[in-house]
Amino acid sequence: MNAPETNPAAPVLHLEGISKKLGERQVLDAIDLEVQPGELVVLLGPNGAGKTTLLGTACGRIAADGGRVTLNGHDPRRNPAARAALGFVPQDLALYPYLSVRENLEIFGRMMGVSRKHLPARVEAALDWSGLEDRSRHRVDTLSGGMRRRLNIVASLLHEPAMLMLDEPTVGVDVNARARIHELLRQLRAQGMALLLTTHDLTQATSLADRVVFLIAGQIQLSGAPDELINQLYEDDKELLVTFLTTPDSAQSEQLKAREMHCGQSGLTWSGTATGGYRDAAAWSEVFDTLGLPVAEIRIREPNLESVFLRVTGEELKL
């Protein structure tokens, strides 16, 4: 599967000042975002942050209340050429379960405008590239979850788009299937395709992303390469993560905040910085004992993207 040639100086996707309300809720608030050719950008954020709405707006399916969307140089809501440059993989599988793998690819290829002349070669390339050659005549409803996800991805690439958007592309698949999908995405990036995806898998984001974008309450709160963001918050220090048995009261919370600790949404989990590394565990235990806070668990660990997510959103994100 080959990505078409694009101007490396121009972003494939450009969002400028995008705002969107659903009812009385401001789902997107003045969003600015670019994705370059050969760049893989991961959107992170808690449920309800606006990630899926942002994808829908970026691809032209949802009309923004304000701002401007440019996809491959055009407005995707007004120009079919812009939409033709996009592949979209929804969170819910968009496949015909009672048709074969090959029949699905042929139908999606025709729907996306692939000519009769080129369709057979595109289908064969998709089967080979996804590793589904030996399943080509099998009905989709007989495939594993990981195989369906791979088929969903290659079906969106038959028209050789300049950009691929994916909403939770590995949800519900096992470790081996997830690794295969990661490899497919890396190959697309290496071929120069622009990729924008949402995920709750922070390991996936760390492994794949050139840049992660934290979307919180409809606003971009933080953006950068995973390693850069971790270093920005922790430098050479370790992360302190503590879970209390009881929620700190207001006085105890103020004492924790004075020690530069940050509260999770549950009120029981707090994070901070262990400047002395793993040796700090005993000292922090004494601090919590002095404050009258019974501890369920103290962890001192190497900071990672989950640490950044907890610090920025107040949530501990788990698969």
Image: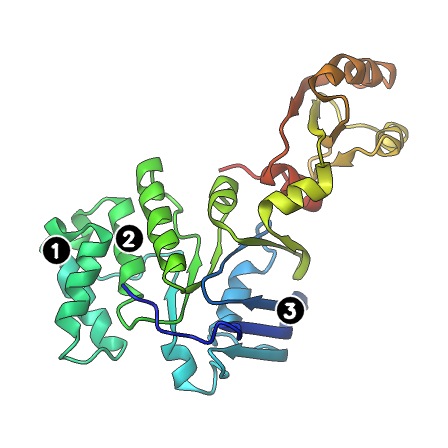
Q: Is residue 288 left or right of residue 73?
A: right
Kind of residue indicated by mark 2: Arg
Q: Mark 1 vs mark 2: which is more N-terminal? A: 1
x%, y% of residue 32?
A: 64, 69
Kind of residue indicated by mark 3: Asp
Q: Quadrant of the N terminus?
A: bottom left
x%, y% of residue 142?
A: 16, 47
Query: Label 1 vs label 3: CA separation?
Result: 42 Å
Residue at position x 40%, y 78% in the image: 83
Q: Mark 1 vs mark 3: which is more N-terminal? A: 3
Image: 69 above or below 295? below
Q: Is residue 175 left or right of residue 21?
A: left
Residue at position x 73%, y 31% in the image: 270
Q: Which mark is residue 32?
A: 3
Q: Which residue has dot 1 on it?
A: 136
Label 1, residues with CA under 10 Å away: few <14, some 14-19, many ≥20: some
Q: Mark 2 vs mark 3: which is more N-terminal? A: 3
Q: Which residue has dot 2 on it?
A: 150
Name the foreground residue: 216 vs 185. Answer: 185
Kind of residue indicated by mark 1: Ser
Residue at position x 64%, y 46% in the image: 228
Residue at position x 59%, y 50% in the image: 225
x%, y% of residue 37?
A: 46, 67
Identify the secondary structure beneath mark 1: loop
Identify the secondary structure beneath mark 2: helix
Label 2, residues with CA under 10 Å away: few <14, some 14-19, many ≥20: many
Query: Label 1 vs label 2: CA separation?
Result: 13 Å
> Which residue, as the protein is rendered here, is positioned at the far bottom?
78
